[in-house]
Image: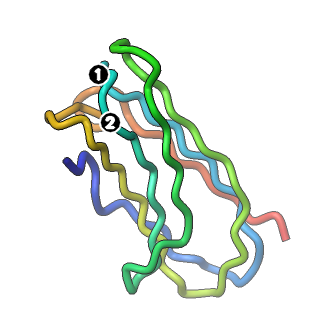
């Protein structure tokens, strides 16, 4: 069940970029929670899998550097495999994505 699809970042200048993504998932102990980053061609750039330890609301975060070329689009996607529809981000608590160029 995909929860959020479509937010993207277009790289303004070639360099190394530091990203931080924070997500709050609705409670459910089943399945995997994923933060996926894909390029404009749908190729996976980064993947972060987490397994909630219990049925409480679950916070997932990821921080990382990426070497990127000017004009590249990076798409941010959330998915989960609990078997039921779970709220994350919009309508529940905003997904926070931040990014800055470090080099």
The C terminus: image quadrant: bottom right
Which residue lies at the image location 64% right of the left edge and 54% below the top edge?
19
Picture layout, residue 43 above or below residue 34: below
Residue 9's label in the rendered image is none
Residue 11 location, x and y as percent? 58, 77
Front one among 68 and 25: 25
Decide if residue 51 is on the left or right side of residue 6.
right
Which residue lies at the image location 30% right of the left edge and 43% below the top edge?
80
Q: Which residue is mark 2?
A: 31
Which residue lies at the image location 27% right of the left edge and 26% below the top edge?
92
Residue 68 location, x and y as percent? 66, 79
Structural distance between the alpha carbons of marks 2 and 1 = 8 Å
Q: Which residue is mark 1?
A: 28
Do labels 2 and 1 touch, CB within 8 Å?
A: yes
Query: In which quadrant of the rendered view does residue 85 lie?
Result: top left
Front one among 83 and 44: 83
Q: Secondary structure at mark 2?
A: loop
Picture layout, residue 71 above or below residue 97: below
Which residue lies at the image location 28% right of the left edge and 58% below the top edge?
5
């Amino acid at each position: 069940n995909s929860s959020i699809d479509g937010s993207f970042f277009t790289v303004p200048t070639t360099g190394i970029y530091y990203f931080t993504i924070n997500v709050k998932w609705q409670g459910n102990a089943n399945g995997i929670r994923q933060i996926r980053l894909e390029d404009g061609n749908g190729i996976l750039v980064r993947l972060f899998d987490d397994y909630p330890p219990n049925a409480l609301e679950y916070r997932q975060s990821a921080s990382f550097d990426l070497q990127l070329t000017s004009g590249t689009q990076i798409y941010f996607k959330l998915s989960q495999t609990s078997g039921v529809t779970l709220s994350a981000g919009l309508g529940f608590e905003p997904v926070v994505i931040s990014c800055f160029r470090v080099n």
